[in-house]
Image: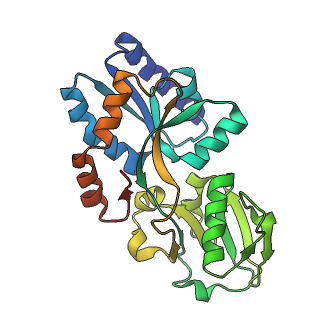
């Protein structure tokens, strides 16, 4: 039923798009901060003659396929490693139109206040998708809690070669992980979901990625569409000095512009 509602919503957006496709830009986004950033640039695009239609979506399985099929002009919810893996596994041909911001992945808990407090056999929730699972495991390796096989390109729990605390990993869809905080000892959560549940990465993260992370969130489009006038207009508005200032002030350093 949820997927049906999402598809119906996209169909409505496509009907609007079809009415004046040259001056309508339909973008699928996750709620925070992606939708807020798109709402911010909407007036700037209107001044350029474009109607930005923003479709909030939480099911990551749909936006890339809809962008590939032309039902969407672009999407804004993911980083390049995630998209690269999607292209390779699903046969899509999407590319990065622009990198916009970094949402550091961090570890959070309602049961402990420091990683030192983790008990033997503690339950740890991480994303099951290859890129975000790998991100989480590398944070734990940097913290000295595990050691990964050096030959693993995208590490999974199966690539852990040392686990002195015998951590028990639970792999879930990323959007579901915040709801497990009452059930697990530690959870790897992306900043967009952290903000959704009212937590503060700067204050609440027990371990978090640094600015060297390669996982900047991108505006993705189908290859060949990146030079269309409306995608150029979208990128220009999304990477303007005004948008950078908005991100810095609105999220107070929890989310970092990368342009």
| Quarter holding residue 116 | bottom right
Residue 42 in the image: state x and y as whole percent.
26, 35
Residue 63 in the image: state x and y as whole percent.
54, 34
| Quarter holding residue 7 | top right
Tell me what residue is drawn at x 68 percent, y 86 percent: 119
- Look at the picture and state if 111 lies above or below 209: below
Q: Which residue is nearer to you in this view: 28 or 232?
A: 232
Left or right, residue 158 beside residue 228: right
State the quadrant of the N terminus: top right
Left or right, residue 67 beside residue 159: left
**Residue 1 visible in the current orientation:** no
Q: Which residue is nearer to you in this view: 232 or 204?
A: 232
Residue 145 in the image: state x and y as whole percent.
67, 81
Left or right, residue 2 beside residue 46: right
Tell me what residue is drawn at x 39 percent, y 64 percent: 198
Colour scheme in use:
rainbow
């Amino acid at each position: 039923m949820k997927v049906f509602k999402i598809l119906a919503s996209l169909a409505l957006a496509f009907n609007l798009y079809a009415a004046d496709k040259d001056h309508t830009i339909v973008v699928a986004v996750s709620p925070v901060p992606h939708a807020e950033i798109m709402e911010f640039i909407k007036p700037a695009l209107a001044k350029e003659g474009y109607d930005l239609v923003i479709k909030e979506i939480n099911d990551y399985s749909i936006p890339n396929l809809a962008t590939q099929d032309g039902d969407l002009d672009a999407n804004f919810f993911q980083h390049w490693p995630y998209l690269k893996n999607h292209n390779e596994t699903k046969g899509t041909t999407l590319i990065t139109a622009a990198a916009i911001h970094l949402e550091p992945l961090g570890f959070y808990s309602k049961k402990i206040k420091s990683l030192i407090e983790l008990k033997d056999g503690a339950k740890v929730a991480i994303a099951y998708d290859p890129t975000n699972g790998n991100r989480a495991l590398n944070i734990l390796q940097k913290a000295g809690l595990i050691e990964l096989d050096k030959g693993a390109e995208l590490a999974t729990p199966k690539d852990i070669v040392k686990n002195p605390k015998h951590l028990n990993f639970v792999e879930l869809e990323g959007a579901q992980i915040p709801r497990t905080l009452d059930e697990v000892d530690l959870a790897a959560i992306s900043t967009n979901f952290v903000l959704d549940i009212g937590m503060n990465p700067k204050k609440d993260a027990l371990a978090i990625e640094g600015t060297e992370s390669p996982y900047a969130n991108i505006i993705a489009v189908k290859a060949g569409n990146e030079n269309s006038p409306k995608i150029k207009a979208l990128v220009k508005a999304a990477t303007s000095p005004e948008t950078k200032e908005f991100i810095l002030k609105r999220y107070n350093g929890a989310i970092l512009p990368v342009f």
